[in-house]
């Protein structure tokens, strides 16, 4: 009995000593912030992300307002709101890397998004970059045009208000599916715009931040769940991954098992690489490129479909909301579109709409204020260390930044919370470009940036030139409440009616 009592006292004493060290003697103890987070990162994150339902980002915002540009949000974690620091740590060859412990839960290791080793990431990105280049987007524009017409036809035919939140997600998923796989996903043809794949994808985000908050327990739980039959534990994340694996199997016909560990590897005889997956399995894609295994191809497909659908749809939904909520913006946009396309019968194409200055300014402002990935994305200090405002930080420290805060920093943005496309038509607007953090920067900038731009340009131009759009009363509100669950999750979906313009 006494031995157990003594053990308990010893454990409590050890915990207290460790807590005191972390708060008062740790290398990061000089930085203000949450004392609870300094003692235990996991429990502080769990409280704000689960007990308070995804409001950790807003608590970080309050801490910055109280303490300044640098706050402590974990045992080895700082959060920085200074745009200059963000520019420095995200530049090419900064030495900073993605934190593997964190990114294994919001992405898949080894993929273009989840790979944390710079050299391996460089090779994978070099293979995929041509698939999303500016030149390639011109070739993909007809896909976007076709899906836009398909979406708008369904919206116009609806007799009741349509859930545009689901419609936009179906639109972007069908586009990225066609681009990546070269095949139809078919979400736009489904009742209520919800396919089995899109349903799994949306449900997968419900687990939100639980992985990064409790990485060890989450790793064990996920390892077990992935090996269980779906009827025992139908976890949406696993269902989505298995659906992607099934599509990989059906798409890649030529494969052979010749690796030492028994994993399947692929080669392709395609003369023309028309889809992203063709590029991914081409042995001659680039120097020193090793063709991924079957599972690695499936993982990359999973990440490309995820990143290319939900983030873009969030921006599109936000665009409709902001433009409809600002009458002056809507009127000026419609004037520009009418002047550019006098006839309602005239085809509204990517090549034409990307040259329209006010539409472009409106898209830039949407991308500044939308929240595709609003929250913290950490970068790890390299072995050489890092000096933050003259204070040396040790290697391994994580510096977090958040697009939501950077895109609203009052030192950069005049009236930062106002939706004002004209800010992008002023003399200093070119300098503002580098401060938009929506797509990231440097070597880890979003691969699909130009495709997202194409979707926004084409859909907004066709929608507001050809149709009268009306939000339902419950959606036509001054503010849309949302929380951060890795992506932005809004409290209500956006419903609207669409009627053809009179000739």
Image (cartoon, helix red, strand yellow):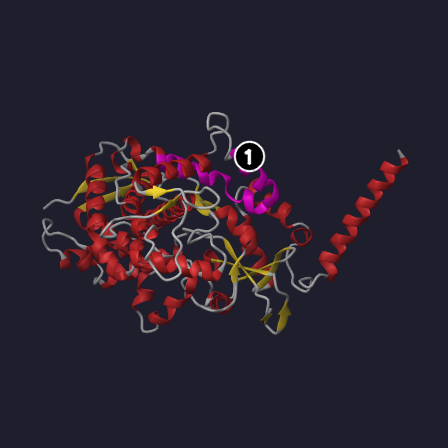
Residue 72 visible in the picture? yes
Residue 261 falls inside the magenta stretch: no
Q: Nearer the viewer, residue 322 or 180?
A: 180
Q: Nearer the viewer, residue 273 or 464?
A: 273
Left-right relation of 255 to 235: left
Number of numbered markers: 1
x then y, percent, for residue 294: 40, 43
x then y, percent, for residue 501: 15, 45
Q: Nearer the viewer, residue 163 or 15?
A: 15
Instruction: Report which residue position mark 1 lands on.
Output: 224
x then y, percent, for residue 16: 78, 50
Left-right relation of 206 to 419: right
Most frequent secondary structure within the magenta stretch: helix
Left-right relation of 240 to 100: left
Left-right relation of 402 to 381: left
Residue shown at 56% from the left, 54% from the top: 60
Residue 221 falls inside the magenta stretch: yes
Q: In which quadrant of the rendered view does residue 350 lie?
A: bottom left
Against 403, is 144 above or below? above
Residue shown at 25% from the left, 57% from the top: 137
Q: State which region is magenta.
A: 197-225
Q: Residues within 10 Å of mark 1 (few under 14, many from 20)?
A: few
x then y, percent, for residue 182: 26, 45
Q: Secondary structure at mark 1?
A: helix
Residue 419 visible in the picture? no
């Amino acid at each position: 009995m006494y031995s157990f009592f003594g053990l308990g006292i010893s454990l409590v004493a050890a915990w207290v000593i460790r807590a005191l060290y972390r708060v008062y003697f740790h290398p990061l103890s000089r930085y203000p912030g949450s004392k609870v987070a300094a003692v235990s990162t996991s429990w502080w994150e769990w409280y704000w992300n689960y007990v308070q339902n995804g409001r950790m980002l807003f608590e970080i915002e309050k801490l910055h307002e109280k303490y300044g540009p640098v706050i402590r949000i974990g045992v080895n974690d700082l959060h920085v709101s200074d745009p200059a620091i963000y520019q420095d740590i995200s530049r090419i060859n900064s030495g900073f890397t993605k934190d593997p412990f964190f990114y294994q839960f919001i992405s898949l290791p080894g993929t273009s998004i989840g790979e944390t080793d710079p050299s391996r990431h460089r090779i994978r990105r070099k293979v995929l970059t041509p698939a999303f280049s500016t030149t390639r987007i011109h070739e993909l524009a007809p896909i976007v045009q076709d899906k836009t017409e398909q979406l708008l036809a369904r919206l116009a035919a609806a007799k009741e208000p349509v859930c545009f939140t689901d419609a936009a997600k179906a639109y972007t998923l069908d586009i990225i599916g066609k681009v990546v796989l070269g095949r139809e996903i078919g979400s736009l043809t489904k009742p209520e715009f919800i396919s089995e794949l899109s349903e799994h994808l949306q449900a997968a985000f419900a687990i939100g931040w639980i992985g990064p908050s409790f990485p060890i327990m989450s790793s064990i739980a996920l390892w077990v769940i992935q090996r269980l039959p779906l009827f025992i534990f139908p976890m949406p994340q696993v269902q989505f991954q298995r659906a992607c694996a099934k599509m990989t199997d059906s798409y890649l016909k030529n494969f052979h098992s010749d690796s030492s560990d028994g994993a399947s590897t692929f080669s392709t005889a395609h003369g023309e690489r028309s889809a992203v997956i063709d590029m991914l399995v081409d042995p001659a894609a680039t120097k020193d490129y090793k063709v991924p295994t079957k599972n690695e191809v499936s993982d990359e497909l999973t990440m490309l479909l995820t990143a290319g659908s939900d983030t873009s749809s969030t921006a599109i939904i936000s665009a409709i909301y902001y433009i409809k909520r600002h009458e002056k913006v809507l009127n000026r946009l419609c004037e520009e579109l009418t002047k550019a396309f006098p006839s309602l019968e005239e085809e509204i194409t990517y090549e034409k709409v990307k040259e329209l200055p006010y539409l472009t300014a409106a898209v830039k402002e949407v991308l500044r204020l939308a929240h595709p990935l609003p929250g913290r994305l950490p970068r790890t200090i390299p072995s050489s260390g890092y000096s933050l405002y003259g204070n040396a930080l040790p290697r391994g420290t994580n510096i977090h930044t958040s697009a939501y805060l950077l895109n609203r920093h009052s030192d950069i943005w005049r009236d930062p919370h106002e939706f004002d496309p004209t800010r992008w038509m002023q003399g200093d607007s070119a300098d503002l470009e580098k401060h938009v953090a929506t797509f990231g920067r440097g070597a880890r900038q979003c691969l699909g940036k130009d495709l997202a731009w194409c979707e926004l340009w084409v859909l907004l131009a066709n929608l507001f030139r050809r149709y009268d759009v009306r939000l339902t009363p419950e959606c036509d509100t001054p503010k849309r409440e949302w929380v951060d669950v890795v992506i932005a999750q809004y409290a209500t979906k956006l419903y609207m009616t669409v009627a053809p313009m009179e000739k």
